[in-house]
C-alpha cells in the first residue's frame, strides 16, 4: 500500500483520553469523493477528498455512534439531546424518529431499514419509508446488546453482540444473527471471549461477519461464514488490549485490522494469514474503504486521517 494524502493536522496524542478530533467512526460516500467522520468529541464532519477541506455537518453532536446509508447519503445519529435523527447530507434536512438513550444503531445501504437498541435485551427494527417511519418489530435477545449492533447493507441480516458480567461468573458474551423477517436468531456465535465492543460488521455481500475479540488482556479477530457458521479467520493473542478498527475490502477478500499497539494488518481471509503488517507512530482508531476500492483511510490517535492507495496493489 502506498501513501496518498493526509487529512487533518497532527496533534500530540493523549493516551488517558483520546483527543476530541480523533475519528471514532468513518465512512466514504458512494462515489468516494467525501469521507464522513465522527470525532471522539461527537462532532461529525465531512472531508472533501479532492480539496482536503472539511465542513462540520449542521449542528450534529453525535452521542457515541452514527450510521450511514451509502445509497441515499443519509446519517442516522443519536444527538446530544437523545433525539434519534435521520439527516440528509444533500440538503441538511433532519427528520426526528424518536427520543431515547439508544446505545447503538445501524442503517441499510438504501436507507429503508434501521435497527436500534438501548443496550437492553431488545432490538427495534424501524421502517424508514417516507410514508411511515415507524418501529415495526422488536426482537428479544438472550443477553443485553452492549457490545455492538449492525445491519447488513442489503437489510437482510442483523448482528447483535451481547454481553453481561456477574461476580463469580465473569463475562458472558455471544453474537446472535437474525434474519429481519425471522422470530428467532438463525445463528449464535459463542467463543468464551468478549466479542464485539469496537467492531461488528458484515462483509459487503453479507456472506461473512467480522468482530474484534478480547481475552486475558489480549485482542484478536474472528470472521465467520453466515450461512454455515464456519470459522474463516481466527486470530488471538495480539499485543494490543483492543483491536479498535476492522474493515472488509470492497470485494470481501481481505479484512484489515488496526489496534491500540499501532499495528495495521491486512488479512487474506481465504488463506487465513496476514499478508501486510505495518506499524504506525500511534494507535489506530478507525478504518474505512472507499466503495470503488481506490482508498483505505486510517484514523490515528494523533487526530490525522492517513489515506492510502488500495486498488493499485490489490483489487483491480
Image (tube, rainbow, N blue to C red):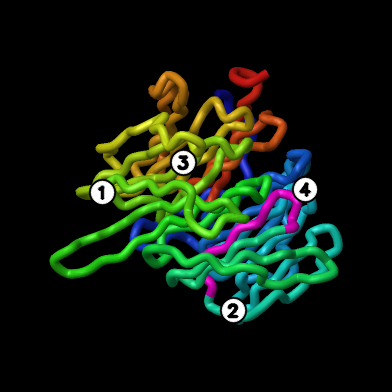
Would you name the residue on which mark 1 appears? 192
Q: Dot 4: what SS?
A: loop
Specify the principal SS of the magenta part: loop
**Picture coordinates of residue 54 (x, y %)?**
72, 54
Choose between 130 and 316: the one closer to the eye: 130
Dot 3: element: strand
Marker count (numbered): 4
Judge whether residue 302 can be spotted in this image.
no
Q: Is 184 situated above or below 144?
A: above
Q: For marks 4 and 3, give the CA distance.
A: 22 Å
Q: Does 134 sit above or below residue 217? A: below
Q: Position of residue 110 (x, y in %)?
A: 75, 51
Numbered tag placed on residue 82 in the rendering: 2
Question: Does 248 sit left or right of 315 as displayed?
Answer: left
- Alpha carbon separation for disc pair 2 and 4: 26 Å
Q: Is residue 15 visible?
A: yes
For marks 2 and 1, give the one nearer the viewer.
1
The range drawn in magenta is 102-112
Residue density around tag 1, few if under 14, some if 14–19, many if 20 or more, within 10 Å: few
Q: Earlier in the sequence, mark 2 or mark 4?
A: 4
Q: Which mark is residue 210?
A: 3
Q: For residue 108: magenta?
A: yes
Crowding at mark 4 (Cα within 10 Å: few <14, some 14-19, many 20+): some
Tell me, yes or no, whether the two marked residues, 2 and 1, touch with CB atoms within 8 Å: no
Amino acid at each position: 500500500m502506498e501513501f496518498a494524502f493526509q487529512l487533518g493536522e497532527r496533534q500530540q496524542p493523549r493516551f488517558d483520553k483520546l483527543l476530541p478530533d480523533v475519528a471514532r467512526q468513518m465512512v466514504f460516500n458512494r462515489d468516494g469523493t467525501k469521507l464522513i467522520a465522527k470525532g471522539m468529541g461527537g462532532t461529525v464532519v465531512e472531508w472533501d477528498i479532492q480539496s482536503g477541506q472539511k465542513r462540520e455537518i449542521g449542528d450534529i453532536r453525535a452521542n457515541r455512534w452514527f450510521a450511514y446509508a451509502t445509497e441515499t447519503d443519509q446519517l442516522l445519529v443519536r444527538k446530544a439531546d437523545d433525539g434519534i435523527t435521520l439527516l440528509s447530507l444533500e440538503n441538511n434536512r433532519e427528520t426526528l424518529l424518536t427520543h431515547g438513550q439508544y446505545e447503538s444503531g445501524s442503517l441499510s445501504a438504501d436507507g429503508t431499514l434501521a435497527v436500534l437498541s438501548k443496550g437492553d435485551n431488545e432490538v427495534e427494527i424501524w421502517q424508514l419509508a417516507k410514508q411511515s417511519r415507524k418501529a415495526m418489530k422488536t426482537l428479544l435477545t438472550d443477553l443485553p446488546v452492549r457490545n455492538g449492533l449492525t445491519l447488513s447493507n442489503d437489510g437482510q441480516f442483523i448482528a447483535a453482540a451481547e454481553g453481561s458480567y456477574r461476580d463469580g461468573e465473569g463475562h458472558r458474551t455471544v453474537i446472535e444473527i437474525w434474519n429481519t423477517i425471522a422470530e428467532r436468531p438463525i445463528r449464535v456465535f459463542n467463543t468464551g471471549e468478549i466479542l464485539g465492543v469496537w467492531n461488528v460488521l458484515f462483509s459487503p455481500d453479507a456472506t461473512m461477519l467480522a468482530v474484534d475479540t478480547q481475552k486475558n488482556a489480549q485482542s484478536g479477530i474472528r470472521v465467520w461464514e453466515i450461512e454455515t457458521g464456519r470459522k474463516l479467520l481466527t486470530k488471538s493473542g495480539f499485543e494490543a488490549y483492543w483491536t479498535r478498527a476492522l474493515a472488509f475490502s470492497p470485494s470481501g477478500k481481505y479484512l484489515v485490522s488496526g489496534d491500540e499497539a499501532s499495528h495495521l494488518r491486512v488479512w487474506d481471509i481465504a488463506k487465513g494469514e496476514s499478508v501486510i503488517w505495518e506499524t504506525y507512530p500511534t494507535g489506530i482508531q478507525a478504518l474505512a474503504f472507499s466503495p470503488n476500492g481506490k482508498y483505505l483511510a486510517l484514523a490515528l490517535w494523533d487526530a490525522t486521517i492517513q489515506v492510502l492507495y488500495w486498488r493499485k496493489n490489490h483489487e483491480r
